[in-house]
Image (spheres, rainbow, N blue to C red):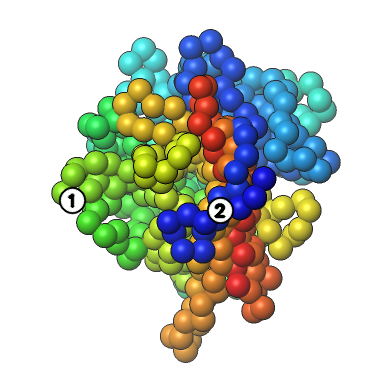
Amino acid sequence: KGWSNTSTAGVQDYEGDPILRPSGLGEWLLGDPTVLQLGDELHLWGNEVFHGILHFSAKLTDVTNFTKVETSVRLPGANRAYAHFDAARDTVILFYEQYTPPFFRSSRIQWVESKVDGNWKWSAPTLALEPALEWEMIGTKRVGNPFVFFNAQASPSRRPVSKWWMYYSASSVHLDDADIDEPLHLGLAQADDLRGNWTRVTATPLAIKGGEFQNATVLGIGSLKLVKGMNGDGTPRVALCNRVTRHDVTHVTGSTISSLKSVDGGLSWQVETATLITPTPAAEPNTWKESYVYGFDTFVSPSDSNWTLVFYNARNGWRHAMEAIGNIDTDLLSDTDEEEGEEEPIRGQMRFYRRTGHKMAAIQPNELNAVKIAVAAAILAAGGNPSLITAIPTG
């Protein structure tokens, strides 16, 4: 299959078939992917609506060919997971959002843990964070979309942080046209130990500045994750984030993935490229991401360390729609010299591989920074429209 240009300058789609579909009875989506390399395999977790969080794996030589391993969390309402490998204990910790039955109008962040021995015996869930602040209980009482990493960078005071950080989303805004709730605010928690106790870093939501959309207003922030392989010590932080919008004239809602940069260690963020990964118009053939692009994760390509694979989730309409994951090609980053106040553009393109199910994209580095992002696999819903895998050269 070949690559085709999209309506976004520098963005190309790859035409292909899906690689993962939902398998559970009555399911219409498989979404919110998180990926992790274990040995010579790439492991992927994604959630269905009723069957919890499913676990897949693929050989590093063929990261579009996933097979199901097991179900890691079996409860309905378990979603938006993030997988972390604890090398010291040879375990995988799966942080995830758990909605509370019977009405599923509130959620908390929990984690489960399993040895990497092929048996995948998961521990009972442990609470990490639950709604407590006023801005975490708007619309629905929820915290979720965890992204966890060890922060060894210096704080704005130049002191090393040396704590575990967790970005999370909180509260929700209801999207009438799709009849779904999407996250509203972005929060930050920290812990001395990966397993907690977790406490808030700030009592107010984190700010994301700039990146306004033409004729659209930002309603909420879905999730924020650092781009793996692009966040060395002493450098500005680089992240992706999806933002939920409403058109000012038509009032149609959407979600777009933007690239961000932080020069204060990750306490505040500036949009670099607002429309990095965008929905595609219904008029385009085989549109699988007509309305929203949101849940995602990144991973350094096993075939070329200059590339990072990005897995993301998309939706092919509003009400009664299906979902998938994809990638795109676009300008991504800019690097700011704090002392001089000058900005050096680090440009990139993101390609998405068209597949009805999982997708991939990539960001390639320029001569100044050997940094690329590739978007790797997309999860598509049953009945599948094609998804795509895209690569982003940053140069």
The numbered mark at residue 237 is: none
**Mark 1 Cα within 10 Å, few/some/many (few <14, many 20+)?**
few
| Of labels 1 and 2, the one closer to you | 2
Q: Is residue 161 visible?
A: no
Identify the residue at horizontal 43%, vertical 56% (top origin).
7
Residue placed farthest to the left in the image?
249
Seen from the viewer's position, the closer of residues 180 and 152 is: 180
The residue depicted at 51 percent of the width and 22 percent of the height is: 383
Disc 1 from disc 2: Cα separation: 30 Å
Q: Does residue 60 sit above or below 262 in this rendering?
A: above
Q: Which amino acid does label 2 sit on?
A: Ser
Instruction: Describe the element under mark 1 as helix, strand or loop.
Output: loop
Residue carrying label 1: 248
What is the quadrant of the N terminus in the image?
top right
The part of the image, by quadrant, that contains residue 17 is: top right
Q: From the viewer's perspective, is residue 285 above or below residue 56?
A: below
Reading the image, the residue beneath label 2 is: 4
Q: Position of residue 310 (x, y in %)?
A: 59, 49
Residue type, numbered disc 1: Asp
Secondary structure under tag 2 reads strand
Disc 1 or 2, which lies upstream in sequence? Answer: 2
Residue at 62% of width from left, 29% of height from top?
20
Q: Residue furthest bottom?
A: 340
Left or right: residue 247 versus residue 385 is left
Crowdedness near tag 2: few (<14), some (14–19) or many (≥20) residues, C-alpha within 10 Å: some
| Quadrant where the image shows the C terminus | bottom right
Residue 67's place in the image compared with 144, above or below, is: above
Q: Where is residue 171 in the image (x, y as percent from the top left)?
A: 31, 38
